[in-house]
Image (spheres, rainbow, N blue to C red):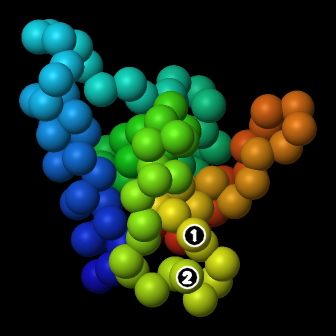
Amino acid sequence: MRVRRILSVLPMLALLLVACGSPAGQEVELAPLSALPQDIQEAPVKVREAYQFALANPDLLKQIPCYCGCGAVGHSSNYDCYVAETSADGSVVFDYHAFG
């Protein structure tokens, strides 16, 4: 239930960002599908797009606290629900907390 709440907030946030101050016709930035592991690529569209959004917009999601109670597992922002760590070479280890 909490994961669904998180996933439902991201598309609304994306729409808000597009509606507030973005040039007309500009789309929300998403990471390429190929940047995701196969199991996330095959996830439902809302889940897949949430991970793509998180990967493409880390600075934004790092500013958004997570309210689903995942602070107990060490998450300090909404970004942590999607990405566990980023290696020095730029490779990403995904967190499956938001996967469902």
Q: Is residue 54 left or right of residue 76?
A: left
Which kind of residue does numbered mark 2 sit on? Answer: Gly
Q: Residue furthest right?
A: 88
Find residue 72 and report its image quarter.
bottom right
x 37%, y 77%: residue: 67
What residue sits right under mark 1 in the picture?
76
In the image, is residue 85 above or below residue 92? Answer: below
In the image, is residue 49 above or below residue 99? Answer: above
What residue sits right under mark 2 in the picture?
71
Q: Position of residue 50 (x, y in %)?
A: 39, 47
Q: Position of residue 48 (x, y in %)?
A: 42, 45
The reply to whether residue 52 is visible in this rendering is no
Question: SS at mark 1?
Answer: loop
Which kind of residue does numbered mark 1 sit on? Answer: Ser
Q: Are marks 1 and 2 in contact (CB under 8 Å)?
A: yes
Question: SS at mark 2?
Answer: helix
Q: CA distance from mark 1 to mark 2?
A: 6 Å
Find residue 1 and report its image quarter.
bottom left
Q: Position of residue 61 (x, y in %)?
A: 45, 49
Q: Is residue 38 left or right of residue 86?
A: left
Q: Is residue 81 left or right of residue 3?
A: right
In the image, is residue 43 above or below residue 72? Answer: above
